[in-house]
Image (cartoon, helix red, strand yellow):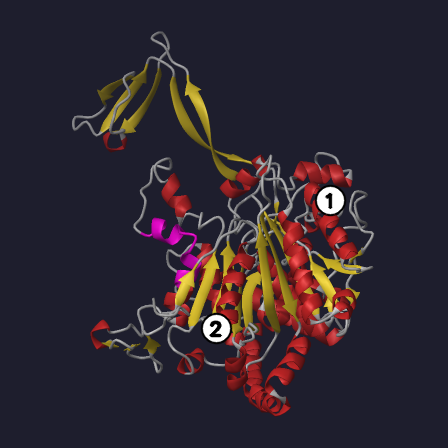
Amino acid sequence: MSSILPLVVGFGGFNAAGRSSGFQSYRRMIFESLNKQERARTLASLAGLMGLEAGDEKAVLSGTLVRRIEPTHFDVENTPASRRIALGGDKSSPVSFTVARRDLPANLPANWELSPLDEEGKQLFVRINENQKVLLDTFEEMAVQAAGQLPNGFNPGDHYRSLHHPRGLQLAILGASDAVKSMGIPWRTVLDCISPDDVSVYSSSVMSQLDQNGFGGMMSARFRAGRATSKQLAMGLNTMPADFVNAYVLGSVGCTGGVTGACATFLYNLRAGAEDIRSGKRKVAIVGSTEAPLIPEVMDGYAAMSALATDADLRKLEGLELNQQPDYRRASRPFGDNCGFTLAESGQFVILMAEELALELGAEIYAAVPGVYINADGHKKSISAPGAGNYITMGKALGLVRNLLGEDALRKQSFVQAHGSSTPQNRVTESRILDQVAQAFGIERWPVAAVKAYVGHSLGPASGDQLIATLGVFNRGILPGIKTIDTLADDVYQSHLQFAIQDQELGEEGSNVAFLNSKGFGGNNATATVFSPRIVENYLAKRFGVDRLKSWQKRREQSRNAAEAYQQEADQGKLNPVYDFGTNLIDEEAIEMSPDELRLPGYKGTIKLNNNEGFEPF
């Protein structure tokens, strides 16, 4: 029996380039290559998202992509910090101050002498006869001041009742809703055609939820003289993006999970979803990842590893003086002379569907994912150093295409979405891998793109950013160039590679196969093979017949019209995300169960209980 091909029938999310559905974020990346009409639509849709006037081109363009961190995140020149200082004091010149009794610490320091200042003793005079160490609230300038931020003026929490939700979970609600609505098929219609547990959801975040509504607030509460809330721990969990999608967007009772693999996390989740579809275990899989790491503490952590592009190093690259501001738009420079990556926020989701169901529903087909490969590096001297695993993942991904489509498709119709993190080490190691793989498979001039030049490095969703851009390339035929660099660095391998420094017109014939490559910290290597809808339709015609395909194309018109209606609303900033909180709850008293099946109230299909998992009776 042939494997079932996982089809991409919906996609959505948000990053520094804008909304994913309708190819908005992709169009922002290739803005210079668009015609007048396409530019106008892109500007108008981004303006709707940002709350701007449609004609304000300068504000729209400057308020998207990688740029200086906006004050809505924090003030990079005056970021809150604490400084440990010693208050000098001895018996001849003690330090003294007044304090309210209610503000005294539970355990009084031994070197404090207290005297009441009023009859009730509510105000006290404190004398310290020895040195006293204290933490002083102050402000400092951030060494790193560039990031890939959501479009200026767009706050995901403003679009639904997001009280106490960390920003990463807000992105999960909006991103998953965007993906579901992009199908143009009501989610209830999908559910009515399948068993309730024919759905799987895989989504996670690498850094968990580290703002004040998640782990960040809980872990810092004691040191901020605050108190942890009942929500911070639960909402901080790195699997919570999947949980939120299940509970508040889909109402799913199917399989769920959150796989993490450092910067390859989205591809790890994509593999889990694609395997569910390919094996026939599920008919629909929602795959995603969200990350909101733009907080000073996280940036400090990556800066301490010398991983981020600091202002000081950017000035050196640009030959600037100490008082001059670097070009933040060009902070992320994959495969050029660079000094570190640029941290970013993003949330990306795709909907995978089995072939038969997609044809039955008349779903739009944006791509197919025949394989995702994951391999570790083996023994390593340094956990952060690259290794052999990426050679394996790339080799397997190309081997799949050669076997399924032939040498010509591999050599003339494929391109690479490189990890392209913008670090000096990555530009050498990844380009070496890509160059050697291309040589081994007889590829002479392999087009290579690196979208982190536009949106920065969003950690977990980074390969989701790559996939969303790839869907745009399939649709439009233009490969986004690495426009933040003027030329490749001298140590980049390029004998068999063609790095797209400017937008590159591939056309339909040159953009049928994509390889998404991701290299994660610790040896988490992943490469996905993705086919264009043109390849998929030819395959489906052979598999199901031309008449079945024509019938699907007729039904597809309805879903296209519904999807376009959603895009027109979304382009005006009317996202109206799905957020079903406390509604459509399952009445457990009404669950019907027999040895063979289980029926849930509110779901049309039943859940079969007599599966043998493919084993013969023992």
Are there few (<14), some (14-19), or many (20+) residues within 10 Å of tag 2? some
Foreground of the two, 388 or 68: 388
- Circles 2 and 1, Cβ within 8 Å, touching? The answer is no
Mark 1 sits on what residue? 428
Magenta-span inclusion, residue 498: no
Quadrant of the image for the C terminus?
bottom left
Residue 369, horizontal then vertical, whole percent: 59, 68
Horizontal relation, residue 378 to residue 218: left or right: right
Is residue 17 visible to the viewer in this orientation of the structure? no
Residue at 65%, 70% in the rendered image: 531
Magenta stretch: dominant secondary structure? helix
What secondary structure is found at the residue carrying circle 1?
helix
Q: Point out the frontmost of discs 2 and 1.
A: 2
Secondary structure of residue under mark 2: loop
* Residue found 64% across the figure and 77% down from its top: 536
Picture layout, residue 244 above or below residue 92:
below
Farthest residue in the front direction? 618
Image disc number at residue 502: none
- Per the rendered image, the range of residues in magenta is 231-244
User: Crowding at label 1, few (<14), some or many (≥20) Cα neighbours within 10 Å?
Assistant: some
Q: Residue furthest left?
A: 120
Q: Look at the image and say whether residue 238 sits in the magenta stretch.
A: yes
Disc 1 residue type? Val
Closer-to-camera residue (211/584)? 584
The amino acid marked with disc number 2 is Gly
In the rendered image, is residue 268 in sight?
A: yes
Which tag, 2 or 1, sits closer to the chain's start? 2
Q: Mark 2 — residue?
A: 280
